[in-house]
Image (cartoon, grey):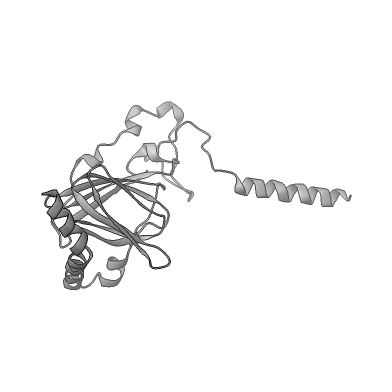
Amino acid sequence: MNSTLVFFIVFCFTSISICLADNDNVWDACPTDSATKETVFINGFPCKKPSSIAAADFKTSTLKQAGDTDNFISSSVNIVTAADFPGLNTLGLSIARTDLDLDGMVMPHSHPRATELFFLRKGIVLAGFIDTNNTLFQSLIKEGDVFLFPKGMLHFCLNAGYEPAIAFSVMSSQNPGVVSISGSIFETDKELIDRMTRRLVSVGAKNLANFSRIHIQ
């Protein structure tokens, strides 16, 4: 067999193997080095020198504080990424806190780069998502329950109880991204967003929320 052909075959198989391989870390940890100025655009953040890594890089208290729900949808979502929590860098994770006041709602949105595990810490919430077949999957979840929003799927949640609700999320990307349908289409008309939100709350939660309230009292 021609040596050039042999080299070409080996090169192709090696390239395919490299492309298919998992992108594992080469260090135990790689906390974000916020002091380093990025001169080259990379998929992530520069890492601290191993000798400068400290326990504080792996702890955050950001999600202790409740978000500001004094708005027209009575909700707040705070996403923490590797930019704010150094220890998350290169691990493919981010975290979030959702606060829902009475009748509060997180408008339909998606995370193009992440699946989300939604853990309800307090309250009663109607959570759901719509798949690519326009099928709605929704469930009334209670304290301690976990609901999963698949990657890229349009999803929402609303408070179906009589008290404020709190949820924590883990997402499978250090930069999940957010595509907000309401923000993209109705950003300039706050009154229209308010009317649409109240309509979604009254229609979407009518059956499940009322059922919950009757049986939990």
Quadrant assignment, res 191? bottom left
User: Percent x, y for residue 181?
Assistant: 31, 66
User: Percent x, y for residue 78?
Assistant: 26, 49
- Nearer the observer, 199 or 213: 213
Residue 104 visible in rendering: no
Q: Exactly how many numbered labels are in the figure? A: 0
Quadrant assignment, res 113? bottom left
Q: Residue at x 41, y 41 (%)?
A: 89
Reply above or below: 154 against 168.
Answer: below
- Nearer the observer, 126 or 90: 126
- Nearer the observer, 205 or 1: 205
Position of 84 with respect to 163 (left or right) is right
User: Percent x, y for residue 189?
Assistant: 20, 73
- Nearer the observer, 207 or 176: 207
Position of 119 with respect to 2 (left or right) is left
Position of 19 with respect to 128 (left or right) is right
User: Percent x, y for residue 85?
Assistant: 33, 40
Residue 136 visible in rendering: yes
Reply above or below: 28 against 143.
Answer: above
Determine the residue located farthest toward the right in the rendered image: 1
Quadrant assignment, res 132? bottom left
Q: Residue at x 25, y 69 (%)?
A: 187
Q: Residue at x 43, y 44 (%)?
A: 92
Determine the residue located farthest toward the front in the rendered image: 215
